[in-house]
Amino acid sequence: MKKIVVKNLSKHFLLKDQSRIEVIGGLSFEVEEGEFISILGPSGCGKSTLLSILAGLEAPSSGEIQVSGKTLGTNGTRLGFVFQQPRLLNWRTIQDNIRLPLEHGALSGEEQRRVAQHYLELVRLKGFENYFPLQLSGGMQQRAAMARALAIEPDVLLMDEPFSSLDELTARKMRAELIRIWRETGKTIVFVTHDIYEAVYLSQKLLVVSERPACVYERIDIDIGYPREYDDDRIFDISKNVSRIFLKMEASHAV
């Protein structure tokens, strides 16, 4: 079943002098129900803008986006978003941060705490309910951010380079944890990164997008089962092939 269908999506921004910057140009792709897909591209190519459009934070200039068979923004689809930085409120406990998006819904205070506790335990932060963000490491804060995004029980989880600010050892642990969480929840995940090895390690499918205006340059299936080993030679080989695609893409763009 197609969970997300993006057709001929374009986005431009107008500057003060009325000149126009084309950020996304005729981008099309599909995501299956429960699929983990990574969008990989050069820095500044419009990947974060694409996620913001999928999340409803930015309006597309043209094109169509469907989620669960309905036009985005018209069907009440719940979309969770994990940003590059955790964006936790330092004056609230970890449990209260996780239940923040639930506070204006129909759940009672007790039900909110129950849901928050469930996802807090899912990301392995049990015992840290009453800690404050600044008492936790960067990796633990990002776990809390994932729990907060999952607390609304989203149909799709959008992730914008969530491990880019972590040291490599912590990032490796978080990638493995993300795979575990994805497999336990069955969520559809759209993950944006510029790290080739990260994208190959995590994903079932890669979309390589070009420099601005971004369009799909290559679609790549990662035919490696889960769980995955970080030092698997197959991941290394696919990463080398993706690197070659990047070099080819950049060379063609420079002409």
Image (tube, rainbow, N blue to C red):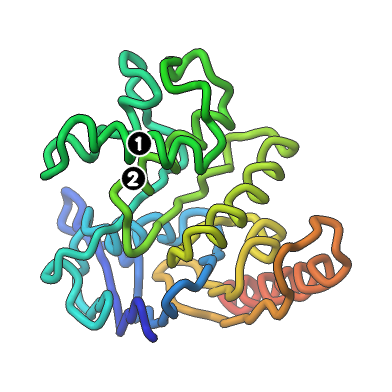
Where 48 falls versus 1 (above or below)? above
Residue at 52%, 69% in the rendered image = 37
C-alpha separation, residue under disc 1 versus residue under disc 2: 6 Å
Quadrant that contains the N terminus: bottom left
Based on the displayed image, in which of its 4 quarters is residue 238 positioned?
Answer: bottom right
- Looking at the picture, tell me which residue is in the foreground, 31 or 239: 31
Q: Are marks 1 and 2 in contact (CB under 8 Å)?
A: yes
Crowd tier of the residue under label 1, counting other residues whose Cα lies within 10 Å: few below 14, some 14–19, many 20 or above:
many
Q: Which mark is residue 245?
A: none
Residue at 23%, 37% in the rendered image = 111
- Looking at the picture, tell me which residue is in the foreground, 252 or 181: 181
Residue 219 picture location, percent across and down? 57, 82
- Amino acid tagged 2: Ala
Q: Which residue is mark 2?
A: 151
Query: Element at badge 2?
Result: helix
Does residue 137 appear left or right of residue 168 in this picture?
left
Does residue 227 appear left or right of residue 10 in this picture?
right
Q: Which residue is mark 1?
A: 116
Residue 214 picture location, percent across and down? 42, 71
Query: Element at badge 1?
Result: helix
